[in-house]
Amino acid sequence: MNWNNFTFIDLFAGIGGIRLGFECMGGKCVFSSEFDEDACKTYEANFGEHPAGDITKIEASRIPNFDILLGGFPCQAFSIIGKKEGFANETCGTLFFDIERILKEKMPKAFMLENVKNLTAHDGGKTFRVITAHLEALGYHVYAKVLNALDYGVPQKRERIIIVGFLDNVKFEFPEPVALSERKTLIDILETNVDRKYYVRDAIRISRQERLKDKKFPRPYISHENMAGAVTPHPYSSALRAGASANYILINDERRPTERELLRIQGFPDSYKIVVPYGKIKKQTGNSVAVPVVKAVAAKMIEALNSFDEVEENDYGEKTEIKRFKAFDNADIVPFERVS
């Protein structure tokens, strides 16, 4: 097939960051699903469609056929900050099961999943091994790598694991970091003439500046206050977080980032519409993905799929060494069951 024209579904769609990355590669979304109504409002304003609701209540047979499954499945159950409940968490951890049942029903040619870096370490690595084993048991060739948004053009240190799978024995390599000259800096994404409502009270500003580790750090910078109260400046943002305090990150220890700046930190285009209040945009961008990372992965996936289709499968298998995860014995693959 011509992989410059393909279809995909957008699960746990959020505000469409993953969708944007794959649309840039010529993809057409044929189905989207998102539970949060505020996120759906933002999604609809920008893509002209209201995502279907709770994926756990949608039968896979009702989903149109598609070529690639995409999903940034909820990560709270696996994050370092969260409670680390993993698959015992009914509302978050077990949502991977819905990805599995849709893959099993539809068997698309490929998928891309995104999650927090700590997924690889959760429960001593068992959670990640279970996920990988189940994907391979469906017949997929699985690749995974932690990528940092800083390496792909946005001023944000955001490390996320990307899991890619192909039904065919496709040779795939993750994208290399972009050149330093192609990466945006804070100067590129910060707005000018910012409204006073974004500026913090003098008491907060003075407190932050007094605790600043490097008081001579060049501006502009974004400071991050950790749980111990230390304030550290950087020429980039720390990872945006949905549930962080209002002053979790501050620009020059003077003001909060604007809605547009939050979107820019995640690599969203300035044409992206803002239709919800500040607090909701803060949550939505914290839950979203760095669009340039997704776009870079999408480009490599389409390149790999196009290359595979240009060569007969038998010849390809003989000439190319495929590096992928070691298959697990059937005895190691246990059926998923929802926790009641």
Image (cartoon, rainbow, N blue to C red):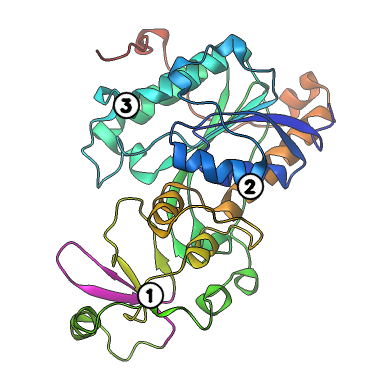
At 20% across and 38% down in the image, what residue appears?
83
Give amino acid for label 1: Lys
Give amino acid for label 3: Thr
Q: Could you say which quadrant of the image residue 122 lies in?
A: top left
Front residue (pair 121, 264): 264
Q: How far across and how far down the image is residue 253, in percent?
A: 31, 80
At 55% across and 26% down in the image, what residue appears?
52
Q: How far across and how far down the image is residue 154, in percent?
A: 54, 64
Q: Is residue 246 depicted above or below 198 in this figure?
A: above
Residue linked to disc 2: 46
The numbered disc on residue 236 is none
Residue linked to disc 1: 197
Q: Is residue 250 depicted above or below 269 in this figure?
A: below
| Tag in front: 2 or 3 | 2
Front residue (pair 288, 166): 288
Does residue 97 appear left or right of residue 244 in this picture? Answer: right
At 42% across and 8% down in the image, what residue appears?
330
At 61% across and 46% down in the image, what residue appears?
45
Give amino acid for label 2: Asn
Residue linked to disc 3: 91
Q: Can you say which quadrant of the picture contains the N terminus? A: top right
Which residue is outermost to the bottom?
216
Whichever of callouts 2 and 3 sits on the residue coming sooner in the sequence is 2
At mark 3, the secondary structure is loop
Front residue (pair 106, 136): 106
Q: Magenta part of the protein: which range? A: 219-235
Does the segment drawn in magenta span residue 224? yes
Asked if the residue under mark 1 is in contact with the one under mark 2, i.e. CB atoms within 8 Å, the reply is no
Distance Cα–Cα, label 2 vs label 1: 26 Å
At mark 2, the secondary structure is helix
Q: How far across and how far down the image is residue 323, in percent?
A: 57, 33
Distance Cα–Cα, label 2 vs label 3: 27 Å
